Image (cartoon, helix red, strand yellow):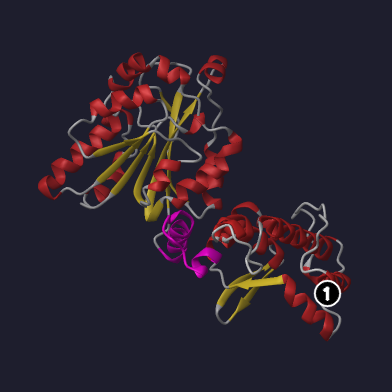
Amino acid sequence: MQSNFYNDNATDLAMQYLSKSFEELHQSRSQFLPAIIENPNAHILDLGGGSGRDAKYLGELAAKTHKKDNQIQIIAVEPANELLAIGKKTTHGLKVKWLEDSLPELTHVSEQEISFDLILLSAVWMHIPPSDRDRSMRKLANLLKPGGIIVISLRHGQTEDDYKTRKMFDVCADELKRLATDVGLFTKLETPKEADKLGRNHVSWQTVVLQMPNDNTGAFSFKRHVAINNGKSATHKLALLRVLLRITDGHLDAVIRRETSLFGDRVILPAGLVTLYWWYYYKGLLPTDSDVNNQKNDRLPTEQKLQQAKERIQHWWQAAWLNNNTGSVATDIKNDAKNDELNEVSAGYAISTTHLISSDKIAPKNHAEKIQQKRFFAEANIALPG
């Protein structure tokens, strides 16, 4: 999100924002607050905190409700540092933590390793380019607790000046609901368009409330959040889960087939793709010759060997899955291994998941071919949401 306009006009904008109260602007969302505020340990995320109007209201309400027992944590996020400074002054003395961050990354928010009961996006979504909205919704879902709520206000009626100066984009409630459904959220409320409280005739507002189911599918999202965002050292099982979840984010078409078993639903993924992701994320953890007192040790991989290993895997993947020649490829690789531990020549292939062949075309014809194919499959029991 571009914040130059908001930094340059921070004082005037803050006066405009603070001229209206939370109750005036957010009547439709106020019905969801009591259940959240009643929890003395609730976590609330205010994205696009601006002048601090909403964070102040929530902080005062939490303090009034729980007094000395108040443990409600409010994190306010604002990408424009000038507005952020004003927001800090507005919420001074309240339990509000401010971060300079923005969608779709929300890097600093993710570093807090917190899941939220309530996420507010007031006048934020129109600043997110359409190309970033899918990723932004995934990020929001990852930060939400099972049963948690996201409240998004949509600004309609952008002008040419808004497009250029304030870096706004058109928004659509139907698009927002579709993106929410894709990540396991359901729509709890969609209001009709309402007139702008500041009297701008060309502007109207709409509120959409989304919720994470408080059941097994919601738990899956929470576990997914832990696997992706936990900054602590991971076990091998957690590391593998992290890789598999990254693949689901970027390569939905890489699933070879889905199966139902006594142990639940599962998907079959190409082992080559899993290996490449593993190599990409955990290459830095592998020791090299220079890591051991700069002494040569043949049992440790050198940078050259690691690169050659990557190219070998790419070659294997490309030939086996895109050329449909598993038998000959396995034989070639076996023969190559006899001559040299690693292929010294770059294969020159790039990974592609857009032309995967269907599972019925790669069914093994005999026992030998079946054994070879086992080298190309990675099976994992993954709970499928919904």
Query: In the figure, residue 218 lies in which quadrant?
Result: bottom left
Q: Work out whether residue 233 or residue 184 is closer to the camera in this orientation and state it.
A: 233
Front-lying residue, 191 or 128:
128
Q: Is residue 50 left or right of residue 332?
A: left
Q: Quadrant of residue 122?
A: top left
Kind of element beneath mark 1: helix
Answer above or below: position of 129 versus 380.
above
- Magenta span contains residue 365: no
Q: Position of residue 21 (x, y in %)?
A: 26, 26
Left/right of residue 294 with respect to residue 370 in the rendered view: left
Residue in the picture at 56% in, 27% down? 169
Magenta span main SS = helix
| Extreme-left residue of the structure | 68
Q: Answer above or below: position of 281 versus 54.
A: below
Residue at (29% x, 39% y) in the render: 30
Residue shown at the point (44%, 33%) measured from the top left: 206
Please say whether residue 205 is visible from this viewpoint. Answer: yes
Residue ID at (66%, 63%): 275
Where 133 falls versus 82 (above or below)?
below
- The boundaries of the magenta stretch are 215-240
Q: Is residue 248 visible?
A: no
Q: Amino acid at mark 1?
A: Lys
x and y, in percent, of residue 168 in the image: 53, 25
Disc 1: which residue: 338
